[in-house]
Amino acid sequence: MTGYATRIRSLFDEIDNTPWGPQEQALVAQAVALAQESGDERLEYEARLRQTSSANMSGDTDLMLTSFAWCLAHHDADPERFPATVEPAGDLLWQYKWMASALAGSPEFSPAQIGAVLDDMEAHYERAGIGPSGVLMARFEDAWAAGRMDEATELQRTLEATPRDDYSHCDACVRSQFAGFFIETGREDDAIRLVGEMIENGFSCGEEPEHALSRILLPYLRAGMFDEARTAHLRSYRLAKDNPDNLAIVAKNVVFCAVTGNEARALALVERHLPWLVHDGLNADAHGAALGSFALALDAVGAAGHPDLTVRGADADALAPVFGTHDGPWRVDELAAAAWAAAASIAAAFDRRNGTDAHTRTLERLRETGAERYDVPIRTHDFSSVATPAPAVTREERLERAVALAHAGSSAALQPLTELVTDAAPAERVRLSSHLLGGLVATERIDEAEAFLPQRIAALRAAGHAAQADLEERLGLLLFGKDLAEAGALLQDEVGAAQAAPPEVRADLLQTLAVARMYEGAFAEAREHARTAALLFAEAGDESREQGVRLLEVDAAASASQFDDARELAADLLAAPLSDGRRARTLASRARLRGVAEQFEAGAADADEAVRLLLSLGADDLRVGEAFLLAGALHEDAGAASLAAGRYRSAAERFESAGAPTAHARYRLGRALIAADMPQEATDALHEVLQEETAAEVPAGSRAITVGLIARAYEGAGDYGNAVGAWGFAADLHEEAGEAEGQAHALVQQGRHLGNFAEFDDAVLAFDTAISLIRGSEDQVGLLAEALHLLAQAKMQRGDEDAVAVVDESLALGRANDAHWYVADVLDTRARLFASRGETDVAVATALQAADAFAHAGDAPSGAGSELLAARLLVGAERPADAVAAYRSALDHAGENEPVRQQAALELGDVYESLGRHADAAEIRATVSI
């Protein structure tokens, strides 16, 4: 094999084992380029077969059509050298099914061109001896898309009567397509049935079930199936949100949010997916559907009272061809109008091409859908994250806003500061240049800061601050935060040499030294320097810089664990007139201090107010995200999980917008959603965490923690099948990390579910492995006890001889550690074990021991269950008279354990009847609620 062939074949292996996505696309492009370079057309054919599939899955229609055309030409010219099927590269005739729909998705292609592709597809299929199902489906989809509904209806009926073959659409696709067609033709009940069958049977493929689930959202709502609709939305969006080729799926989910009272979530989805409108230039059909859906959602946001909110990202240059040019950020109401207009233009183009009015009517129906309203809260977004700053028009307003942003530490201050400093008066130029240099250094734009420093020094001299100018010429950007971590000694010398300098110069040196000491961890010393600097700034009459260094003192005192002092300093500062930016920072500091004091609700209120101020200023996404994260943590600590979830969601979205990691915020979001009884939403957030952690090659132990939380989310959602898989994956990751205790915990949780699924062999293996990992570990006695008890139960179900030995070991462990309730629970299991072996007397005695142990542990209602077991065993042993006392005791102890009480009463009534005590039977049965 040549060198080229070896490299290309190696790439093929890697491609075939890489999931669809950017990495896979890059590998395919590399394989095609190498094959072209080698001149081996057979290798290029195999590479392009892969490229066609890759482009289809990623939504690159242009590349898909080009690659397919190249392969088809070579196949037609030499079918032996370029066969239709090359495994595992792909199947040219299967790929044919994508071509007509790709052409139909753009009005640039005429009906004649689409028809020619369909005819050519049919000819190729007939020559290959392939049945008509695949071609019929392609013709059905074309007729439906073009609005030729009578033709589409006839083709759909023909398809249902046509035998399936190897080139038929898969079960998932057929059901999804037919469901979509039925919805459009007024057969929503049939659509619900089809999608239900699809989900129940687990049918899936490349874009299913997410496509079918998005289609069925409105029919579910109209049928009053709100829980099903909510679940379908969450699953559909989770599966679709990362692939731009799924734009039409996302669009339907946006509509769902708009009509179910989740307008804030709808806006967040619109903002996130706006860039997809320019992803695939030949997929105008999806673009039109998305534009209409986005417009409907924006109308809903406006109707909810927020028409003047800014739609983040809508003013991107790439979107100008879609929405047109616009002066400044787009408001919700403005973008809604532009989106409706763009959608109508696309619909008109399709209708001209097709000679129907189908697309225009679809858009009209969408507008009508906007009037529908259903109460299906998702509770993951609110409008607190999208407040719009008031416009700053005059120079004075822009100046005030820029300084406030600088006080907030926001990088959004840099542009307005740069604009304002150029024509500022000398004194104002001094102030603005200080903020500008501090911001440039903080954002690591060191070259720009170095270039601007001479202008700053010149401004100082022009304003009469010669001593400060001399200092900055000597120390440079050190005074603005550069390399402070290593500058403590130098700054200390400068302070000592500056005793005769003006107070503002000494104050500047001291505040810089205070920050340097903070880097060193010398917090108490930093506080003293900050306090002295504040006094010197006050002496110099510079109130603004005095406030800034007093905020530094607050943070230094807090870092030195001088919390009472820090809270008092913060309160004094907040009582003064502050800029909104500095007030936001001070509030955030006080919020943290209140969290330390466990004043969580008050701290959360401070953090929320800090968020509001930053949003009103138009602070950068990173700074706002940090404030949301703080607010979320405090709401979570206050027990307000749903409020925390909203803040964490906003934090993650802000971090994502800023290009910063989101995993920490999304992990907290997932945890809060579980606590707020929103486990399905939690799985969405936590899968994103896992994706980000995997891409960043986060250590296995950290990923194991995330996967464990995903497993808990699945449990909360009642999705125990996926929980089994998640716990197994968590165990593998803990093992990879060398974390035996974490692995054991995950295996015990997995084994519990396996036992519930009657997969006892796998459950026993999981428990045995877990026990071997932690036996002898004093820190894991509780987990060992749980594992032993569950192992005993699984062995009992299997009928293992050693089940008694395991349950007795569990019992001994519980008694040795005075775990009274656990001992009672194990005794109950022991009773059931002996019952399963037919040892009735021992089982009855043990069950009554369990009941006594539960009562001793303060849980008599659980003991009632053990007494019910004893009574049933006695009845089974034909000792009904003896069973009466056990039943009576169970009734006396059942308390709030209503199922046990009801069952005991019913069964005791039957026992009384068998004993001829009919009056007693009637009396006891009268206590049973029907």
Image (tube, rainbow, N blue to C red):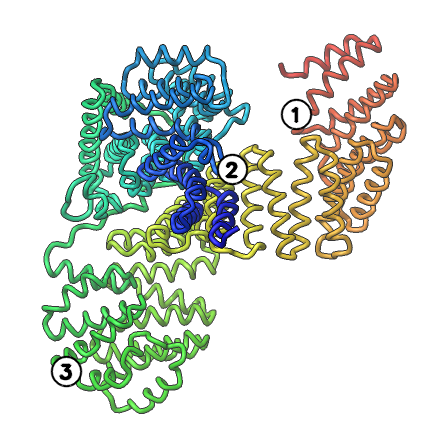
Q: Is residue 874 left or right of residue 335?
A: right
In the rendering, which numbered label is found on residue 88?
2
Q: How many residues crowd around disc 3 within 10 Å: few (fewer than 14), some, or many (20 or more)?
A: some
The residue beneath circle 1 is: 898
Few, some or many residues within 10 Å of mark 2 (<14, 14–19, 20+): few
Q: Quadrant of the C terminus?
A: top right
Of the image marks 2 and 1, the number of the one nearer the N terminus: 2
Q: Secondary structure at mark 3?
A: helix
> In the image, which is nearer the foreground, mark 2 or mark 1?
2
Q: Depth check: 189 or 50 in front?
A: 50
Question: Residue 924: image x %, image y %?
Answer: 73, 15
Which one is earlier in the sequence, the residue at label 1 or at label 3? 3
What amino acid type is highlighted by mark number 3?
Arg
Residue for point 34% across, 59% down = 587
Asked if labels 3 and 2 touch by Cβ distance under 8 angstroms, the answer is: no
How far apart are labels 2 and 1 at the CA level?
60 Å
Which amino acid lies under the numbered mark 1 shown in the image of this protein? Answer: Glu
Q: Position of residue 7 (x, y in %)?
A: 49, 52
Residue 911 position (above or below residue 57) = above
Position above or below: 127 against 4: above
In-front residue for pair 356/569: 356
| Picture disc at residue 461 | 3
